[in-house]
Image (spheres, rainbow, N blue to C red):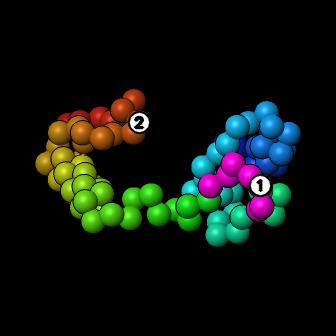
Amino acid sequence: MVDEGARAEALRAGCLAGAGLDVFAAEPAVRPAVLGLEHLALPLHVGSASTATRHRMAMTAALNCVAVLEGPRPPDLVNPEAWRSG
């Protein structure tokens, strides 16, 4: 969680040197307080938009699904404490 207003103020005051953001609290809206600030990049959530990256994302998801269906613990499990194999 990020306080978007506090981040905007930190950028405006020079307490934060810069920021690159591709996710916002109320997507697709961008908080007006950050628009026009220097040292702020808003790349529109396209950081993964290459063919190689999308292929890797799809393969990772597929391998995790296969692991769940076959029984072993998925390789990229986010919350391992919740996993019960068996």
Choose top left, top right, bottom left or bottom right for residue 76. Answer: top left
Report x, y in % for residue 42.
Answer: 62, 59
- x, y (%) of residue 80? 36, 32
Task: Name the kind of residue labelled 2 in the image.
Answer: Asn
In the rendered image, the residue lying farthest to the top is 81
Answer with the quarter of the image where residue 26 lies.
bottom right
Q: In 3D space, how far apart are the residues under numbered discs 1 and 2 (Cα atoms)?
A: 37 Å
Give left or right: position of 27 versus 83: right
Q: Is residue 73 left or right of residue 14?
A: left
**Residue at the spot 83% in from the left edge and 58% down from the top edge:** 33
Q: Residue at x 33, y 36 (%)?
A: 83
Q: Circle 2 — which element?
A: loop
The numbered mark at residue 22 is none
Q: Secondary structure at mark 1?
A: loop
Residue 67: horizontal and vertical position, in percent?
Answer: 18, 47
Task: Please name the residue that numbered disc 2 is placed on.
Answer: 79
Where residue 1 sits in the image (x, y, percent)? 66, 43
Q: Main secondary structure of the magenta part?
A: loop
> Which numbered disc covers residue 37?
1
Frontmost residue, 69 versus 58: 58
Residue type at tag 1:
Leu
The question of residue 44 being in magenta is answered with no
